[in-house]
Amino acid sequence: MAGVQKVTFTGSKGEALAARMDMPAGLIRATAIFAHCFTCSKDILAAKRIAGELSTRGIAVLRFDFTGLGASDGDFANTNFSSNVGDLVRAADFLRQNYEAPSILVGHSLGGAAVLCAAGAIPEVKAVATIGAPADADHVIQNFGASLDAIERDGEATVTLAGRPFKIQKQFLEDIRTQSIEQHIGKLKRALMVLHSPIDQTVGIENAGRIFAAAKHPKSFVSLDSADHLLSNPEDAAYAAEVISAWAGRFIAADRPVVTSPDREGVLVAETGEGKFQNFVRSGKHRLLADEPISVGGLDSGLSPYDFLAAALGACTSMTLRMYANFKNLDIGPISVTVLHEKIHAADCEACAEELKSTSGKIDQFERRISVGGSVDAALQKKLLEIADKCPVHKTLEGKAGIVTRIVPEQA
């Protein structure tokens, strides 16, 4: 999975909503929103898998906690289905202002019903995918069991859902009973994919049939076979992610302009909040991760700082040699450079200048192993080694560089 950024935006009730942006490693082809299931969070397996898979295909995904859930602010008791739909619209506003308005909506369970209703208020949306979604929003009421009478009688009651207590107010029931999901589906005017398990014990397969029947083409149905409602089996979540990713790509024009984040001077490196060391790295339109190996407490999700340094030296060397070969019309085949890094005693550095060899203690040594695909005689090998030493990054590492450090306000 590419970089994951922590972001926040203001929800429909004015509360700060916690979110994650799953960012592609390279150029962004489109943006999407993932809406989680009732009382779930942005970090459930299905959300993380699908967002990660979409990001590998160049689609940035915003997944967030609805008001009052997960890490988002607000009181869940004051929310309802309409506020969830409103949160989705505000999420789209956030993307429109900071990245690009979403062209894809993905919703799981009640989140699927919510994206079907929200799509009409987000004109840029081209495709909507639902996973285990109910055809009626009030389907969720069956989870309240014996507490339903108490809610109707007393105006509110505490309901245990998935082992956790939630306060449900009567206004929630009144709001959800006024919703007509099928009417929204009939007016969707977007491509629709319905994913559902035939053995879903929470939202029956008949719901998928009703959603599919109410929709107009283009529409698709995918059976999730033996999956449970939450896609708790990683293989089921991965399958759904792959199918949605491949399908969504059909609605992104291959020649459309790529999305770039707002311009920022220099290279940005910022903590993601995932693991102990993971950092998101952005340079212009390019994104990747920095991390440390598992052996030192990292997640091993990206290059280490010294890996980046070695990569800079290797890339610069390869590019410098390519420029020379092209200038001289040399057919040396493809160039590859392997860079090894280690700490050694200065006295053991064979290639170091005498001044450096006399340094006490250890120094950093980078060893480059250059390979070319064509036939190269001894004379040309010697020349290529000479040219490699002219690489600008090589010169920077061997020379002296000034580093200026300042503390700046966060907004800068």
Image (spheres, helix red, strand yellow):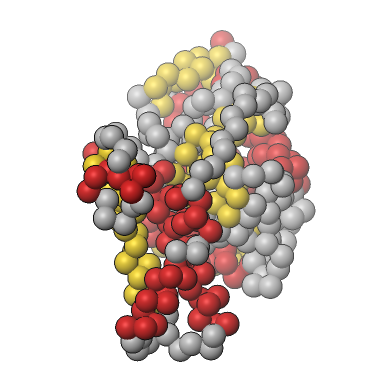
Q: Is residue 59 above or below residue 63?
A: below
Find residue 8 and report its image quarter.
top right
Find residue 305 and report its image quarter.
top left
- From the viewer's side, name the closer residue of 247 and 154: 247
Locate the C terminus and report the quarter of the image it occupies: top right
Picture mark count:
0
Q: Is residue 351 left or right of residue 64?
A: left
Residue 69 image position (x, y, % from top left): 52, 26
Q: Residue at x 42, y 75 (%)?
A: 384
Q: Residue at x 51, y 69 (%)?
A: 320
Q: Is residue 30 visible?
A: yes
Residue 291 image position (x, y, % from top left): 39, 42
- From the viewer's side, name the closer residue of 160 and 328: 328
Q: Residue furthest top?
A: 154
Q: Is residue 94 above or below residue 154?
A: below
Residue 100 image position (x, y, % from top left): 71, 50
Find residue 210 and report its image quarter.
bottom right
Q: Is residue 387 left or right of residue 7?
A: left
Residue 229 image position (x, y, % from top left): 39, 46
Q: Residue at x 58, y 55 (%)?
A: 286
Q: Is residue 99 above or below residue 75?
A: below
Q: Residue at x 40, y 54 (%)?
A: 310
Q: Is residue 9 left or right of residue 144?
A: right
- From the viewer's side, name the closer residue of 148 and 386: 386
Q: Is residue 231 visible?
A: no
